[in-house]
């Protein structure tokens, strides 16, 4: 895989190249080159099978990370291309002309994260929730526990036994935990 | 289209007056079409899925799949739990074969924290045994299920009864019938009990008997042959365009199998060859699945013969309540009864995972492939096509 | 579409989802269900309102038990032939096919699976319910003829189970429809399901399985709870 990655990075500018296993490599690519690189890999290098498209929310850096994971049936290895887009203005070019399953992934990402793919067919339809009127639910600033307490009528008297607390009390009963307790102890 | 049961060509005025492809636009306000909703409450649908059909006479013009009836928001729930709390939660993502999800969580956390080679040999053989048994009980429901869509219902009764016997073996090994929490990061939870191999061999002899009876019931049957041959053909160039994996690809002649291409656990020490067929219709896919049933029984016998008798079942792992994994990401895959399943796992440096994303094989089969395959088909064949593509709704919407 | 229009569109979408205002005026009725005028074959014009024309416009009524020997006989008949609707709503429906096979035979208890709600007596809610399925379950439950019984399977119906903090599953089932028998477990074994059927038969023979009448008595309260979480209501109020 190493010669292949060197050939690809001479054509496009790749950052953060990580060899996870000897048949899986992840690389980051800029937003303008992403669809070009995917088309080049599909037509000329034999990566004809799209495994999945996914999205991660990095709220500390203010970015969304999209992932295109491609697989080559002849070389039997995978390459994952990561694209970082801005969190305030989430728009990305659509890739629905390359494979026939991409419009489903783009519909799901729009519903759960709020990223728009202009030109993708049937993108306004609901995928898993009906009548959803809050913010997109997979973002990190949506608190699902609080939403469930507020909307669905929970039955009270629910006791949680946190295993970490239980073990700490059993093994280290007298040690202080917070910074103030440590200061008072001295 | 000439109805193959009538034996004569019907009147031209009664047939649909246009040929449709998946891309034509249909004018709903002209009174030629009728909308039928094949909803979640239906005995023929595989799980809780709905298909909205636009129909002219008996022929389908357009189809739309609706999913989301089983959505629980797993990916959001797992982000709120510790690594070890995630694994009883993630099992319930797929109801038909729950052991695959346990393997994903265990393998991803081991790879990202550097313990990938620390799992002992006996534990890996036990993992292989439980994965193959899960495949077997999924196939015992799926192979006669195709006959069930053409009203050959006795096969389903035999298959579900034998599946109960395999669930008894699971109960001996792990403690529960359906959701066994057996494969954990570092190894497995318990060793084989005494006498397990003899009882398993008794059950496998019953299944051998069942295999011959199912062949006579389904594949020597004239009703099955008339209805299933030539129905819903998948051509080899559709496979990369749609991303089709598993038995659906092997039914058209393209040999893709994760156990041979990217071997995991000890599959390179076993001796097997994935079966293929060339026609690509419903009959060929059922035939391939029946061959896989024979092959899975053979694999279980090979595993029980080759595995060591005793050994360590668990590696020494850090305290799981305080476990922090450094930043990284990985993709783990395996071959389930329906095709290639995979999980994309991302961690940052804290004690909870950042994001997990399960890729189920039915994601493409049930939405992109089914909608294009139903155009031009008969209304009575919808369930046969759905079951032959093995669509399982819980892994689409998690 | 130009770049400028798209930015406006996505920022509008996000602003609308944050505001969450004036949803009461928006209706979710499908185009084929709207009120319209149709031309009949003989040329006359008919007004059609599909949602209200095909369903009952009254509220459900209570059926008081008759009492005495007649009621005892009717209760015995109802208890010995419970016909269950075959709608698998959640994970628990994987333990129902073993009940049909000869190993845990449920036919000897008089229990059968039927495909349509108009011909069935009992409804097994097998596990969690997402909001999308709850809408269909309410429509199906109101289409069953009285007297009807509900068995709630699994611990997700009691207090939410392991999905207690999910944005898409409900926590308490008996705020929306009334429940007769709870069967706890995750998954309950088929023998536990059979024990639940035996308990239901005991309740029917004693005359205590009257939750369908309670639904008719407190209909407004149940309907208010249902409409609070189902935000796109495009069905009539009572689906009989």
Image: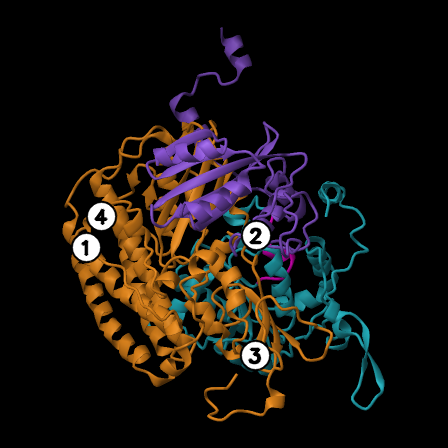
Chain colours: A purple, B orange, C cyan
Dot 2 falls on a residue whose secondary structure is: loop
Q: Are marks 2 and 4 in contact (CB under 8 Å)?
A: no
Q: Chain ID for label 1?
A: B
Q: Are marks 2 and 4 on the same chain?
A: no
- Which residue bears the numbered disc 4? B268
Q: Residue at x 51, y 49 (%)?
A: C161
Disc 2: CA contacts within 10 A as few (<14), some (14-19) or many (>=20): some
Residue B80 is situated, as x and y percent measured from the top left of the image, at 52, 37
* Residue B98 in the figure: left or right of residue B171: right
Q: Chain ID for label 2?
A: A
Please tell me whether residue B378 is drawn above or below residue C226 in the rendered image. Answer: below
- Which residue bears the numbered disc 1? B271
For the record, the magenta segment spans: C167-179
Please tell me whether residue B111 is drawn above or below residue C118 in the rendered image. Answer: above
Residue B92 is situated, as x and y percent measured from the top left of the image, at 44, 51
Residue C105 is situated, as x and y percent measured from the top left of the image, at 37, 73
Q: Are marks 2 and 1 on the same chain?
A: no
- Which residue bears the numbered disc 2? A96
């Amino acid at each position: 895989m190493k010669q292949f990655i060197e050939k690809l990075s001479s054509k496009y500018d790749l950052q953060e190249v990580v060899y996870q296993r000897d048949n899986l490599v992840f690389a980051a690519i800029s937003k303008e080159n992403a669809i070009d690189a995917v088309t080049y890999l599909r037509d000329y290098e034999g990566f004809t099978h799209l495994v999945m498209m996914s999205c991660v929310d990095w709220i500390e850096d203010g970015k969304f990370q999209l992932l295109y994971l491609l697989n080559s049936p002849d070389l039997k290895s995978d390459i994952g291309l990561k694209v970082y887009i801005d969190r305030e203005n989430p728009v990305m070019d659509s890739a629905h002309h390359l494979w026939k399953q991409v419009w489903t992934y783009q519909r799901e990402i729009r519903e759960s994260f709020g990223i728009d793919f202009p030109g993708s067919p049937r993108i306004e339809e609901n995928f898993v929730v009906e009548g959803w009127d809050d913010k997109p639910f997979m973002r990190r600033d949506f608190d699902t526990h609080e939403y469930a307490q507020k909307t669905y009528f929970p039955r009270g008297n629910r006791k949680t036994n946190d295993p970490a607390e239980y073990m700490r009390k059993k093994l280290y009963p007298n040690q202080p935990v917070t910074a103030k307790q440590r200061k008072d102890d001295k | 289209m000439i109805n193959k049961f009538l034996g004569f060509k019907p009147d031209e005025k009664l047939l649909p007056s246009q040929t449709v492809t998946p891309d034509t636009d249909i004018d709903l306000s002209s009174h030629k079409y009728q909308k039928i909703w094949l909803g979640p409450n239906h005995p023929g649908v595989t799980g809780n899925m709905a298909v909205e059909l636009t129909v002219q006479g008996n022929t389908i013009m357009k189809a739309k799949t609706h999913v989301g009836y089983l959505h629980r928001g797993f990916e959001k729930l797992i982000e709120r739990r510790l690594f070890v709390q995630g694994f009883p939660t993630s099992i319930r993502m797929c109801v038909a074969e729950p052991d695959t999800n346990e393997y994903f969580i265990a393998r991803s956390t081991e790879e990202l924290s550097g313990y990938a080679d620390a799992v002992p040999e006996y534990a890996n053989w036990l993992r292989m045994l439980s994965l193959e048994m899960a495949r077997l009980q999924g196939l015992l429901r799926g192979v006669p299920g195709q006959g069930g869509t053409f009203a050959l219902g006795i096969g389903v009764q035999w298959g579900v009864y034998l599946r109960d016997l395999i669930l008894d073996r699971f109960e001996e090994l792990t403690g529960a019938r359906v959701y066994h929490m057996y494969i954990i990061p570092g190894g497995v939870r318990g060793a084989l009990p005494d006498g397990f191999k003899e009882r398993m061999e008794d059950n496998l002899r019953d299944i051998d008997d069942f295999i011959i009876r199912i062949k006579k019931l389904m594949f020597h049957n004239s009703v099955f042959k008339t209805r299933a041959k030539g129905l819903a053909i998948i051509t080899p160039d559709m496979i990369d365009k749609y991303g089709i994996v598993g038995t659906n690809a092997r039914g058209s002649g393209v040999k893709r199998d994760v156990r041979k291409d990217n071997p995991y656990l000890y599959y390179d020490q076993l001796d097997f060859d994935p079966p293929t067929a060339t026609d690509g219709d419903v009959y060929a896919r059922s035939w391939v699945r029946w061959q896989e049933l024979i092959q899975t029984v053979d694999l279980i016998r090979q595993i029980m013969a080759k595995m060591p008798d005793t050994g360590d079942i668990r590696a020494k792992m850090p305290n799981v309540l305080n476990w922090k994994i450094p930043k990284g990401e990985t993709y783990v895959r395996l071959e389930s009864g329906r095709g290639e399943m995979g999980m994309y796992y991302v961690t940052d440096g804290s004690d909870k995972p950042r994001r997990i994303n399960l890729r189920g094989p039915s994601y493409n089969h049930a939405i992109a492939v089914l909608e294009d395959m139903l155009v031009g088909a008969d209304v009575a064949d919808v369930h046969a096509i759905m079951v032959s593509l093995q669509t399982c709704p819980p892994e689409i919407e998690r | 579409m130009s770049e400028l229009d798209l930015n406006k569109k996505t920022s509008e979408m996000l602003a609308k989802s944050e505001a969450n205002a004036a949803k009461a005026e928006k209706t979710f009725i499908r185009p084929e269900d709207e009120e319209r005028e149709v031309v009949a074959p003989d040329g006359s014009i008919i007004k059609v309102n599909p949602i209200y024309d095909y369903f009952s416009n009254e509220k459900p009524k209570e059926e008081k038990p008759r009492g005495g020997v007649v009621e005892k006989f009717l209760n015995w008949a109802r208890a010995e032939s419970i016909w269950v609707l075959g709608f698998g709503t959640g994970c628990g429906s994987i333990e129902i096919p073993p009940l049909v096979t000869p190993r845990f035979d449920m036919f000897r208890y008089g229990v059968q699976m039927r495909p349509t709600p108009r011909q069935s007596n009992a409804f097994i809610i097998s596990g969690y319910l997402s909001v999308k399925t709850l809408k269909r379950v309410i429509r199906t439950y109101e289409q069953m003829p009285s007297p009807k019984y509900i068995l709630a399977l699994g611990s997700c119906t009691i207090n939410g189970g392991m999905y207690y903090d999910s944005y898409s599953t409900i926590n308490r089932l008996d705020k929306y429809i009334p429940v007769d028998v709870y069967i706890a477990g995750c998954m309950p074994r088929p023998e536990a399901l059979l024990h639940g059927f035996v308990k239901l038969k005991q309740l029917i023979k004693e005359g205590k399985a009257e939750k369908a009448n309670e639904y008719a008595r407190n209909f407004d309260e149940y309907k208010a709870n249902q409409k609070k979480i189902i935000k796109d209501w495009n069905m009539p109020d009572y689906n009989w």
